[in-house]
Image (spheres, rainbow, N blue to C red):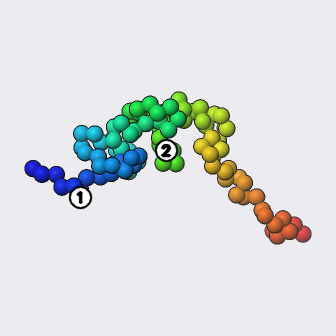
Amino acid sequence: MEIQAANIPLCFTCNEKVYPLEKVETSGKIFHKQCFRCLQCNCVLRMETYTFNNEKLYCIPHFKQLFIAKGNYEEGFGFDQHKRKWNMTNPSNDIFSE
């Protein structure tokens, strides 16, 4: 049986071909086992020791550490807080003012 190169998926991390024996799949993404690593500490992850947030892999301890450091997901992972997007840019257009 011959494997056709066109059907071989690419690793989400390194963009190289991933063959069945080296494949990890989660959240619709495919990784090499050796590319399935924490973004913070670079440790190789297992299915029971990872989290996938904003298309980034973290080990559970570093995910918790980043979350606790800022107290919310947005700032902990380098994004603007959603509450800032709710602030009005032109207070004179306030629908509650008389």
Q: Residue at x 57, y 33 (%)?
A: 64
Q: Which of marks 2 and 1 is nearer the N terminus?
A: 1
Q: How far apart are marks 2 and 1 (CA)?
A: 26 Å
Quadrant location of residue 34? top left
Q: Which amino acid does label 1 sit on?
A: Ala
Left or right: where 30 falls relative to 81: left
Residue placed under numbered mark 1 in the picture: 6
Q: Which quarter shows the C terminus? A: bottom right
The residue indicated by pointer 2 is: 56
Q: Residue at x 61, y 37 (%)?
A: 67
List x then y, in percent, for residue 14.
39, 47
Q: In this view, does 69 lie above or below 16?
A: above
Q: Quadrant of residue 32?
A: top left
Q: Point out residue 24 in the picture as x, y percentages from the top left corner.
A: 33, 41
Residue 84, image x and y in percent? 72, 54
Residue drawn at 53 percent across, 29 percent down: 61
Vertical placement of residue 89 versus 11, above or below: below
Q: What amino acid type should be assigned to the residue bearing mark 2?
A: Lys
Q: Residue 61 carries which label?
A: none
